[in-house]
Structures are given as C-alpha cells and as structure tokens.
Image (spheres, grey):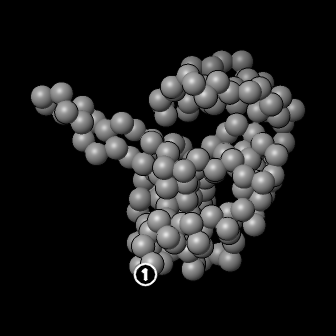
C-alpha cells in the first residue's frame, strides 16, 4: 500500500473518527506548504517543506501529522514531523503509517505510540492549558484565507495575540 492509499484508507478515517473536520471549527489542511523553498543562486528554489496534514482548530494550527506508507515503520516520519512542527512552532506532532500513531510533544519531550489522535478539544486544551477569554474571542475571528501569510508572519501574529490575551504590557 503506497502513501496516498494509506492516507485515504487508514489515516483519513482515523482523523475523522477523532473529530477532525467533523467538529465545528476544526479542519484538516492536506499537503500544506510550510515554505516555498529557499531561494538559491540563480533564482531557483530548493525543495518545498510540505506537511501531509496540519490540524487546525478555531483558526489556529495545533499539530502536524506526517504520513508514511503502511509498508514502512511508524518511526520513518518522526524526523520530518519534528522538523515541520518546529518550523511552525507547534507543540504536538504525529508520525503515522496508518497502522500505528507515534505522538511527539515538543514542549515536554514526551514521545510514544498512542492509539488515537487527540480530538480537537483535547488538543486545544493540551496546547492552551490555561483557558483565556481573550484567546477564545481572537479564535472566533474569521481568518482571511486569501491573504497569503508566510509561516513566520502567522507565528508573529499568533504570538502578539497570545501576549494581548495574557494581559502583557509589552509586545515585541
């Protein structure tokens, strides 16, 4: 079974069973381009960084899922999953071959095989352990998806909004 078959037959149904793309305000971004690739000498670009799945809830990217063929070991995508989550400054990432799911928390360093993905609410509560009224208000503002923000611009916006939500007086 190749990677695209694994995604369609094994990974997509598991994500759906966990509420991704089903629960209101949750969505799955497939083949998400993180970067367009570094500009090289001569004007060409290096290879793009593309995540197989990005899990989004309330307009905020919360996790990466790196998919590999069912014929490969679950650990084959761990390095990529960590790289993509680090680039997007996300706490949670997964590597999967459809049969097993390897979960990684970049905040605590906790890693291991899990039976399922976290639901949108579980992942939201894990990412934002302290509930905040302002964060919820900011998350309810619809995002203009036609505005092509780069990953680092989105990180800066999210960090500024989080600082406001936490009542910080200085934001840089």
Quadrant holding the C terminus: top right
How crowded pointer 1 is (Cα within 10 Å; few <14, some 14-19, many 20+) is rated as few
Q: Can residue 41 be seen in this view?
A: yes
Q: Position of residue 67 (x, y in %)?
A: 49, 65
Residue displayed at 69% across by 47% down: 27
Residue marked by disc 1: 71
Is 98 in front, or is 79?
A: 98
Place of residue 75 in the rendered image (x, y in percent of width and height, measured from the top left) = 45, 74
User: 171 or 62: which is nearer to us?
Assistant: 62
Q: Is residue 72 shown above or below 45? A: below
**Snapshot quadrant of residue 138:** top right
Q: Position of residue 16 (x, y in %)?
A: 72, 62
Q: In the image, 15: left or right of 109?
A: right
Q: If the image is split into quadrants, where does the N terminus sit?
A: bottom left
Give the left or right position of residue 119, taking residue 109 as reference: right
Left or right: 143 with respect to 73?
right
């Amino acid at each position: 079974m190749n990677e695209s078959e694994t995604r369609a037959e094994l990974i997509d149904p598991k994500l759906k069973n966990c509420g991704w793309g089903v629960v209101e305000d949750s969505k799955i971004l497939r083949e998400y381009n993180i970067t367009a690739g570094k500009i090289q000498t001569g004007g060409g670009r290096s290879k793009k960084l593309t995540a197989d799945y990005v899990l989004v809830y309330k307009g905020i990217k919360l996790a990466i899922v790196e998919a590999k063929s069912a014929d490969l070991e679950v650990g084959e995508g761990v390095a990529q999953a960590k790289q993509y989550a680090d680039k997007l400054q996300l706490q949670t990432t997964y590597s999967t071959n459809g049969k097993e799911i390897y979960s990684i928390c970049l905040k605590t360093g906790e890693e291991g095989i899990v039976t399922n993905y976290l639901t949108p609410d579980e992942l939201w509560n894990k990412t934002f352990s302290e509930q905040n009224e302002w964060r919820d208000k900011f998350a309810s503002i619809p995002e203009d998806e036609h505005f092509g923000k780069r990953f680092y611009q989105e990180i800066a916006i999210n960090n500024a909004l989080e600082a406001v939500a936490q009542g910080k007086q200085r934001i840089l």
